[in-house]
Structure formats: structure tokens, C-alpha cells
Image (tube, rainbow, N blue to C red):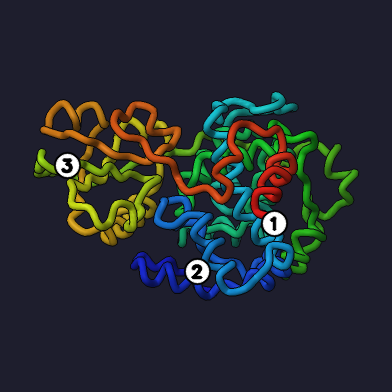
Amino acid sequence: MEIKFDTLYNAILEKIDAIDPIKYGRSRNYIDGDVSYLSPYISRGVISTKQILEIVLKKGYKIYQIEQFVKELCWRDYFQRVAQVKDLNTEIKHPQSPILNHEIPSNILEAHSGVSSINDAINTLYQTGYMHNHCRMYTASIICNIAKSHWHHPAQWMYYHLLDGDWASNACSWQWVAAANSSKKYFANQENINKYTYSNQRNTYMDKSYEEIETMETPTQLLDTKKFELPLTLPESSSIKINNTLPTFIYNYYNLDPQWHKAEAGNRILLIDPDLFSRYPVSKKCIDFMLDLSKNIPDIQLYIGNFKTLVETHPIDHVYFKEHPFNFDYKGIQEDRDWIAEKVSGYFPSFFAYWKKVEKQLK
């Protein structure tokens, strides 16, 4: 199946319109399931979970009919709320244990894991910037719970390649799999992998009962580990022009919303902070995707540098930006992101606790 992510805003809206939330709930766990493929646009801030839900509900669906779909949207909001109050580079609840290394199995990087469906998923990730959510969980479980690699470096590896790379969703999910953000490690076996990926592989190290997998030694093909190289290719810097009689709207990797202050005249700056990207590197494919999406915003200008340097070297006044944990050094008028339940904020120790509050507001 060919996976292609259009970057024209109207094409993205058509994808939202094409969602069948009931089919999604029934089939989303299968690799050919009726998933939306909207996550890259949500992560880049082109569209929001709230926007998607409002469009779907206008078609006449009731929350109880599409609860699974709504929950998946809310999972993304939940992880964002966690990121607002927690340092996601450290364990949220528990130290991961046991740990053999802080690297990643070489055979995972080379898509030679020994499990054909995982190899296919890794190759798809490299080629397209996408990996099915179930395959992300399988891959993370093999790395963290079978190879016993610490979750952080492998999470960086996956974030680096994903077009929908979102550090909150990514880090929280990896910690959930490794039981650093949950009460129990997530395991899958070959039978489960075969079921949801339509494979028939046998006699792998995963072809065991769950009880055996949870207690087995790390297979020899996962023992060789190394650090993943994270080459970063940013656009070249160019001069920008500022009209200091107009407000300035700051866009970035997490905010590429073409509807944001659309009707207002202003300076529109896509800020690419090399320091931030050096801490959270992404592939050239991801950078190009960001740049293509930014073309939906008329007259946007590209600035390579941090926020402080931007405002010190240009006559900028009345700066607007959207709230995000990575925007901690921005100064100006901060505006909230769109939330499905804007009044439900703060830290909740579980999605279930968060969902109960959201569910009440939705009703």
C-alpha cells in the first residue's frame, strides 16, 4: 500500500472529510485498517484534534457511536497536557528496569530484526516517514523489553524519522511500553504480530507464549547495539523583511496553522531554531515536509536562528505565538492551542482519569 502525505491544505481537509470513524474503531489495529493518516498534520499544527472532532460530529455522529475514534484524538491531547508539566526526557513514573544499554540494537537499525513484519515496518518508516501505531508498539517492545535498551535513545531514533514526530506523544508512548509511564511492560508475541500484520512467520524469538517472552534472555541477534547517528540538515539562512507597523506571527515545527490570524495583516515568520533541532533532531524528509506545509501560509518568511536573536536583530513588536513546551524562551502574546476539552488541564496520572473528565465535558 502506497502511503503519501499531501501538503496542500485543501487536500488535508479532504482527508478529514473522508474519515469513517466507525470503521476506524473496528479496524485501526490492523496494518491495512481504516486509519486517518492525519497524525503528521496534527503534529505539525496544521490542523487540531478539536477541528477534526468538530468536522466529524457535524456529520451527525454521536460521541458514543465513535468513542474509540474520539479517545484516540484525546490520547494526543492527553500527552500534550503531560508535556506541559513533566520533563519527558526523564521517567515519568518509574525507572525502567532492567537495562542492558543506552543504545539501540544494530539489527533494528538495519531492519534485520528477525521478525519480517517489524523489518517491513522499519523500512516503511525510512521510506515514507510513517509507521503504523501497532508496529510502533511492537518495535518499542522488542527494543525496550526484549533487547532491554533504555527507551530514550530509541525514541529519538523513531522521532527523527516520523513525519508525525511529536516528542510528547513519542516519549510518553515509549515510556508506556517500557513501564516507565505505566504499571506493566507491554509485550507482544509472534501470534499477535501475525494477526495484525497478516504475516505467517514462525520459529522466531517472538514465537513463544507471553509468559516465556516476559522472562527470556535477550536473543543473540539483539545483543549488538550502537548509537544511532542523527544527521541534521537545516535550510540555509536568508534575510527577512519586517514591517514594524504590523504584528508578527511566529510559526515553527509545531505550529503551521494556515488559518491562524489568517485575516490579519502581519509579518509571518517560520522560525527554525538550530539549538532546538540539535536537541531534537529530525530527518531531511521531516524538514522538507515542514517547509512544504508552510507554503499554505501566504507570505511566510523563513528565519534560521533562535527567538532571542530574531527580536534583537529585527524591529519586531507585538509578537504572537502559540503555546508549546518547546517555546519556553518566546516572549510576546502567547495564545492557547486548540484542545478538545480546554478546561481539562494539568497532570493526570493515567489516560483513564483524563478521559473521564473530558467525557463529562463532551456530554
Residue occupied by mark 1: 115
Q: Is residue 115 left or right of residue 330?
A: right
> Crowdedness of circle 1 by 10 Å Cα count: few (<14), some, many (20+)?
many
Give the number of the mark in front: 1 or 3.
3
- Tell me the tag on residue 237: 3
Q: Of callouts 2 and 3, which one flags the residue occurring earlier in the amino acid sequence?
A: 2
84 displayed left or right of 60: left
- In the image, is residue 310 above or below residue 267? above
Q: Which mark is in front, 2 or 1?
A: 2
The amino acid type of the residue labelled 2 equals Ile
Rendered residue at 17%/42% (across/down): 237
Residue that appears at 63% across and 42% down: 173
Quadrant of the snapshot with the C terminus: bottom right
Element assignment for label 3: loop
- Most foreground residue, 187 or 59: 59
Front residue of this view, candidates 129 and 270: 270
SS type, badge 2: helix
User: Are the residues flagged by discs 2 and 3 in contact, CB closer than 8 Å?
Assistant: no
Task: Examine the rendering and report whether any part of residue 154 can be seen.
Answer: no
Q: Which residue is mark 2?
A: 16
Q: In x, y percent, where is residue 20?
A: 61, 73
User: Label 1 is placed on what type of residue?
Assistant: Val
